[in-house]
Image: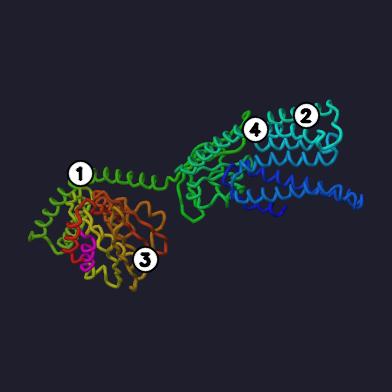
Amino acid sequence: MAAAVATAVRAPGQAGDPGLYRKLVWLTLFRILLVSVLLGGAAVVGWKGGEEGINELAPLYGVVVVAYAAALASSVLLWQGRALQATAWGHVVLEVLVAAGIVALTGRAESVFVFLFSLAIVNGAILLFRRGAVLAVSLAVPAHLLVTSRLFGPTAPHPLTLFTQCGAFLATAALAGWLAEQLRRTGETLAARESDLALVTALHETIVQSMTSGLLTLDPEGRVTFLNRAGEQMCGISLAAARFRRSTELFPAFEAETGRGEVDFVNRQGAALRLGYSSFPLVGEEGVRVGTAVIFQDLTRLRAMEEVVQRSARLADLGRVAAGLAHELRNPLAAMSGSLELLRLHAAAGDEDRRLMDIVLRESSRLEELVSDFLRFARPPPPRRALTDLAAVLDEMLRVFAHDPAARGVKVIKELEPAPAVCDADQIRQVVWNLVVNAAHAVKTAQPGGGGSILVACRPDGDRVRVEVSDDGPGISPGDLEKIFIPFFTTKERGSGLGLATVHRVVDAHEGTVTVASTPGHGARFTVLLPAALDFAAGEVAATLGASGR
């Protein structure tokens, strides 16, 4: 029997009120325990009284059997999870009937088990609140009067005794019903508050986890108590792994007590980030500090974009100055070169004079070439944009480069996918040519005997077309990376320092970007991103690819 009820606790089919279900389970267990104690007591008494005692207690054994049978039926109903309300009403009626049977068999009004009626009333209030208490007392008073009447014995108890006992039943019903109603109202209020709290907690959790900024909280000892989803992604560590560990171990960049700032941060995956943060104390009741909160954002891309914009602005300003200066240089250069040509042809000029004039003319020619490069950088022609298959343009350019002296001893690897873009094909061809020539020079510097390689790749990349030129040369030192796009900065002996600056200006004019990544000793990779041909119809793109043989 107990096993059946225990099984009902473990595997309920709760189709109704779960609170009523739990109360029914516990009251069923309580009844089994009570009846078992009664059975044990009756058995002891009967055993001491011999055969006569056993015969006298036979009706009591019948009541115990009925109670066990009712408990079994209740367990089956609870297991199925059906008719919980009907089962509860049946519990109340059964409790009163069992109490009446036990009282009738153990002395009627003088029985020590009269309290079972009060217990049945309390159980009714527990199960069904005031209704259960009213039902129980409505059954208990008539049942008690019935079992104490002359029908069950030769004499009736004293009226005062009956009045006292029935009054106790009524008082118990009133008190139990009132307490049960108060408990019910309190439970409903608590359930409503718990529901409100759950909604507020869920809203708070949703807001915190939906933030694009990282949120880190620390206790007064500096241990991590919370890290939201954005913070986990930026820092490369989960909340479960970071909880209760000291912030100085995981986030040394946020060691400052309070304030704002920006710090360089390397996360658990080794990614270098630029983080902006704001740290402030968490204050509880009565102004007591309960910890620290840090809100932080990943500013890496923003700072990189700002740097690109500032660099473009500096180059534009320099270009305007350079254009005027180049024009001012070109005019006197032309006059000097013309005058020297006339002097060189003069019959009175000796061989030494002509040799010196040749040197001046050669250097003037080199200076004229430098001024021309300067002008191309300072005032590049506006791009004539058209739908272009960059893969075809680069393939053609690399075929020409293969016959250039700069390509001697260098292996060029091509990874070109069809990539329709909107650009000036001639200008982009010159951009990639400059990058490939620089890469060839770097490879030959690292391996003078030849054997180095250059990879030129082209492929679509979302709303952009990506062009990459990488080499296995000596790489670029960190100090030079920030200056390679500045005009006149060069590491070559006879370089002008305008090649990469011009590349930057042309790509800017195409509303694209050019970046470089390099590790000393492991080569360099230049990446150019240009607008893809998204605004053109599929037919036009297909025609362009078809015309280029793709």
Residues drawn in magenta = 388-400
Residue, x 65% and y 32% (percent of image)? 131
Question: In the rendering, at what x and y percent does residue 193 appear?
Answer: 58, 33
Residue position marked by numbered label 2 in the rendering:
166
Question: In the rendering, at what x and y percent does residue 290 appear?
Answer: 62, 36
- Which comes sooner in the sequence, label 1 or label 4? 4
Residue position marked by numbered label 4 in the rendering:
131
- Element marked by disc 1: helix
Left or right of 55 on screen, residue 270: left
Q: Nearer the viewer, mark 1 or mark 2?
A: 2
Residue position marked by numbered label 1 in the rendering:
324
| Magenta-drawn stretch, dominant element (helix, strand or loop) | helix
Residue position marked by numbered label 3 in the rendering:
473
Q: Are marks 3 and 1 in contact (CB under 8 Å)?
A: no
Q: Is residue 452 above or below residue 425?
A: below
Residue, x 55% and y 49% (percent of image)? 239
Mark pair 3, 1: CA separation: 37 Å
Residue, x 72% and y 30% (percent of image)? 173
Q: Amino acid at mark 4?
A: Arg
- Which comes sooner in the sequence, label 2 or label 3? 2
**Magenta stretch: includes residue 531:** no
Q: Amino acid at mark 3?
A: Gly
